[in-house]
């Protein structure tokens, strides 16, 4: 006897081959009915025997295609008899957009085999893809995810491609970006005058490879934006790129042909190989080994950011090169990546020598994602291509909530949407201090509202009133009559990590440790080295680093030596200290500065706000060792240099960390660094190796955090500890603190799916705002 079911599949199930999978399973189990895309995801109406239907439903998640991520499957019994005699895939139906859009995915093995086969009609075709790989978010303009709602609408399919697209048994069935050389996008090479370059027997990719080998710099249009490429083994080419791009120190990313090529330059674990080779194809931070590349690729760094080819264009280009190529964002330093040919011609003139262009529109800018394996887990440092807009399921207790929009922070901005029990984060946008980044921020906000049919009822912003994201959220809330919630910066960091690990809304408070640069505190203070008792609704500050002046305000973030002087001036009598340690480089350097001016600033509290920032502490100690003493050229440079210096001897210095002190004032524990400095100055006077001093600094910080955590954990009766904030992107610190806390029996959580830095801030803002409803 035939029975019927309506089956709703929710999650990332459109544009990934879910309907043909359903069709094949229906054939296997002898079912009749229909399947279609709608605003909720994929809907099935199927009839067959009870046993066949039951097994069909059981197999749906087990047989799901590679890029599908099923959130839930709901079934309803159908009373009506079937009106069809076979199983069909039918046209999409519109409705509220509640389905997830898949992330852009690296070229699959089947497509790679085709572009490598001289007998295949897609041989070396740079836009080859199927339902298992290729562009998604970068080309989508609307929901449902059909070709008419993508950048591929401009390219009608030829008969051969249309036949694949229409055949449920073909892996290109409804592959919305399907194309071939006959009907799809076109690739060409231009010189600085905009003239297309052609040479008999060579295509644009082969010509580009030859130019890279010759030492030229190319602007290459990819999936989510432009990159600048050159030979990573050519010192002159890499140094020239640095000067032209005005990126003087920050390491460049590399792309290698395959794991074997990268293995000649970096050390790779099995997990790191899997991450490089997966569909997200991120940049993975790896330790150098073996053969050297140009020193200018990563000056002074013992690590390299590496990725593998993730488009057919990259695969074909790397096949013609004997070494990795630098592949860095196509922009000037601090600007957003170019995404249009016109913008690239304009903004990359003077940087690139040639332009490798195509005529497929990039609907949304997507930077490369960056991750690093730390404490045994992959940790996202930048979440973008390959990961967004994958959804995060909210913890228990957040199933019913109003639509929330969280605006994010000022630096490393992302925003977050909460809807239907899911969180949707934007890709990495960047620092809103840049006007072009602000434009991109607004574009993506508008795009996400349209793509996900999202109408917020609640706006969440950072507590800092001068953040542009806060101001934009206030304007939005005022214009639309919406409620707005201000969320404390570090509470948002802690809540984001709690929600990532699924701690329920009614969970007991955890001990949150937030170590970062700066965030506005409850009474207008600048925090950054904080210990909280926290749940999703409230927090209580239990301990903090000793607040110290930021000499010159924002200048203290740019010139690390200012933090060194602020520390020494606070903890010691400067005249006595500089006399006793007059021979030390740091003392001589500081005495050459206009200290009388700074002393007046401190005495009169002029442009010297107090801050408990952990990041500025690292800057102070790095400058004492001569690391980025005078200035940094990118955020976190001094701390990264200190980590690099410490890494080779870190294990041997365990137990040798400098000591801190602590006191309690008004119930708040203050961590003091006076004994820390005395130990460091002793080692400097003894001419101890700087690497050993750097390692002892790290161990000292780890021990200070752990000892404070254990005291507070006992006080509040919680063994759950959250480690978050940008400073915990320091591998040595994260791993040592985590190790010691686990040895003490604590359960330790630290961000993995989201950045520990401000890139994960919006998720925390959103979850706290939702908890308050």
Image (cartoon, rainbow, N blue to C red):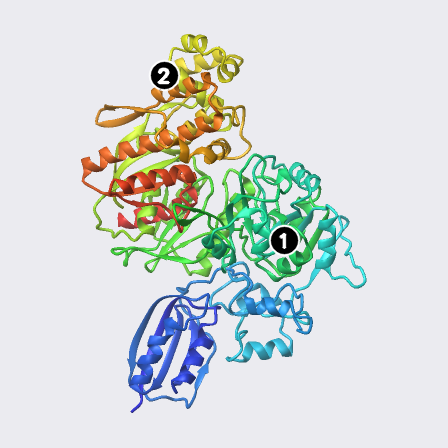
Lower sequence index among marks 1 and 2: 1
Distance between the alpha carbons at the discs numbered 1 and 2: 54 Å
Are the residues tagged 1 and 2 within 8 Å (C-beta)?
Answer: no
Q: Nearer the viewer, mark 1 or mark 2?
A: 2
Q: Which mark is residue 571?
A: 2
Quarter holding the N terminus is bottom left
Residue sitting farthest toward the right? 200
Residue at (30, 46) in percent of width and height: 768
The percent coordinates of residue 50 (x first, y second) are: 29, 85
Tally the marks: 2
Q: Where is residue 663, by image quadrant?
A: top left
Residue at (62, 59) in percent of width and height: 315
Q: Is residue 32 above or below residue 392?
A: below
| Along the line of sight, the residue nearer the viewer: 626 or 757 | 626
Residue at (69, 57) in percent of width and height: 320
| Along the line of sight, the residue nearer the viewer: 233 or 3 | 233
Note whether residue 147 is visible.
yes
10 Å neighbourhood of mark 2: few (<14), some, or many (≥20)? some
Q: Is residue 333 left or right of residue 186?
A: left
Q: Find numbered disc 1 in the image and state the secondary structure of the residue it sits on.
A: loop
Residue at (48, 10) in percent of width and height: 582
10 Å neighbourhood of mark 1: few (<14), some, or many (≥20)? many
Q: Where is residue 77, by image quadrant?
A: bottom left
Q: Which mark is residue 509?
A: none
Note whether residue 527 is visible.
no
Q: Which mark is residue 340?
A: 1
Q: Find numbered disc 2 in the image and state the secondary structure of the residue it sits on.
A: helix
Q: Is residue 580 above or below residue 723?
A: above
The percent coordinates of residue 660 (x first, y second) are: 32, 24
């Amino acid at each position: 006897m035939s029975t019927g079911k309506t089956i709703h599949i929710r999650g990332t199930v459109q544009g990934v081959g879910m309907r043909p999978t359903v069709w094949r399973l229906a054939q296997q189990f002898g079912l009749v009915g229909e399947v279609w895309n709608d605003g909720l995801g994929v809907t099935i109406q199927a009839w067959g025997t009870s046993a066949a239907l039951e097994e069909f439903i059981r197999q749906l998640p087990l047989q799901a295609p590679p890029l599908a991520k099923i959130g839930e499957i709901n079934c309803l019994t159908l009373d009506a008899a079937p009106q069809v005699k076979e199983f069909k895939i039918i046209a999409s139906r519109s409705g509220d957009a509640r389905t997830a859009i898949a992330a852009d995915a690296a070229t699959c093995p089947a497509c790679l085999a085709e572009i490598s086969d001289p007998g295949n009609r897609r041989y070396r075709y740079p836009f080859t893809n199927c339902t298992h790989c290729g562009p998604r978010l970068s080309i989508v303009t609307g929901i449902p995810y059909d070709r008419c709602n993508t950048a591929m609408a401009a390219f009608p399919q030829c008969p051969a491609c249309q036949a694949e697209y229409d055949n449920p048994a073909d892996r290109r069935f409804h592959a919305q970006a399907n194309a071939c050389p006959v009907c799809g996008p076109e690739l060409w090479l231009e010189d600085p005058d905009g003239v297309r370059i052609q040479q008999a027997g060579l295509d644009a990719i082969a010509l580009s490879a030859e130019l890279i080998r010759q030492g030229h710099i190319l602007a290459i249009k990819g999936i989510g934006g432009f990159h600048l490429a050159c030979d990573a083994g050519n010192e002159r080419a890499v140094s020239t790129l640095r000067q032209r791009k005005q990126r003087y120190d920050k390491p460049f990313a590399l792309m290698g042909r395959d794991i074997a090529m990268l293995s000649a330059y970096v050390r790779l674990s099995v997990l790191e190989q899997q991450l490089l080779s997966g569909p997200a194809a991120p940049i993975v931070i790896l330790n150098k080994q073996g053969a050297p590349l140009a020193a200018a690729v990563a000056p002074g760094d013992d690590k390299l950011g590496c990725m593998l080819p993730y488009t057919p264009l990259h695969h074909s280009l790397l096949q013609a090169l004997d070494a990795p190529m630098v592949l860095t964002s196509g922009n000037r330093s601090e600007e957003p990546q170019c995404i249009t040919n016109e913008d690239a011609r304009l903004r990359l003139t003077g940087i690139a020598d040639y332009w490798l262009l195509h005529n497929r529109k990039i609907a949304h800018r997507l930077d490369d994602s960056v991750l690093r394996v730390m404490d045994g887990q992959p940790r996202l440092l930048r979440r973008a291509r390959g990961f967004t807009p994958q959804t995060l399921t909210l913890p228990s207790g957040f199933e019913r909530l109003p639509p929330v929009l969280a605006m994010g922070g000022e630096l490393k901005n992302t925003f977050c949407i909460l809807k239907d029990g899911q969180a949707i984060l934007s890709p990495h946008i960047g620092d809103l201090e840049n006007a072009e980044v602000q434009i991109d921020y607004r574009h993506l906000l508008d795009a996400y509202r349209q793509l996900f049919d999202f109408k917020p009822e609640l706006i969440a912003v950072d507590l800092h009133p001068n953040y542009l994201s806060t101001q934009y959220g206030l304007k939005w809330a005022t214009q639309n009559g919406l409620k707005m919630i201000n969320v404390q910066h570090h509470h948002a960091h802690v809540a984001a990590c709690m929600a990532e690990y699924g701690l329920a809304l009614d969970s007991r408070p955890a001990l949150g440790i937030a170590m970062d640069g700066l965030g506005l505190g409850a009474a207008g203070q600048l925090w950054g080295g904080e210990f909280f008792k926290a749940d999703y609704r409230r927090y209580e500050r239990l301990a903090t680093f000793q607040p110290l002046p930021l000499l010159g305000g924002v200048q203290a973030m740019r010139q690390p030596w200012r933090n060194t002087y602020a520390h020494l001036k606070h903890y010691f009598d400067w005249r006595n200290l500089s006399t006793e340690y007059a021979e030390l480089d740091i003392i001589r350097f500081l005495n050459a500065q206009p200290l009388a001016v700074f002393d007046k600033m401190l005495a009169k509290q002029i442009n010297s706000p107090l801050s408990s920032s952990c990041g500025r502490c690292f800057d102070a100690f790095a400058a004492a060792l001569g690391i980025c003493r005078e200035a940094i050229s990118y955020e976190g440079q001094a701390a990264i240099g200190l980590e690099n210096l410490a890494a080779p001897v870190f294990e041997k210095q365990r137990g040798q960390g400098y000591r801190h002190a602590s006191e309690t004032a008004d119930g708040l524990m203050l961590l003091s660094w006076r004994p820390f400095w005395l130990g460091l100055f002793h080692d400097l006077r003894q001419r101890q190796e700087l690497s050993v001093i750097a390692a002892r600094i790290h161990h000292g910080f780890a021990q200070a955090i752990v000892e404070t955590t254990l005291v507070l954990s006992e006080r509040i009766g919680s063994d759950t500890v959250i480690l978050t904030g940008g400073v915990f992107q320091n591998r040595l610190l994260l791993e040592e603190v985590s190790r010691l806390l686990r040895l003490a029996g604590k359960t330790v959580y630290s961000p993995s799916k989201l950045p520990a830095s401000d890139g994960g801030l919006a998720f925390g803002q959103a979850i706290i705002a939702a908890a308050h409803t």
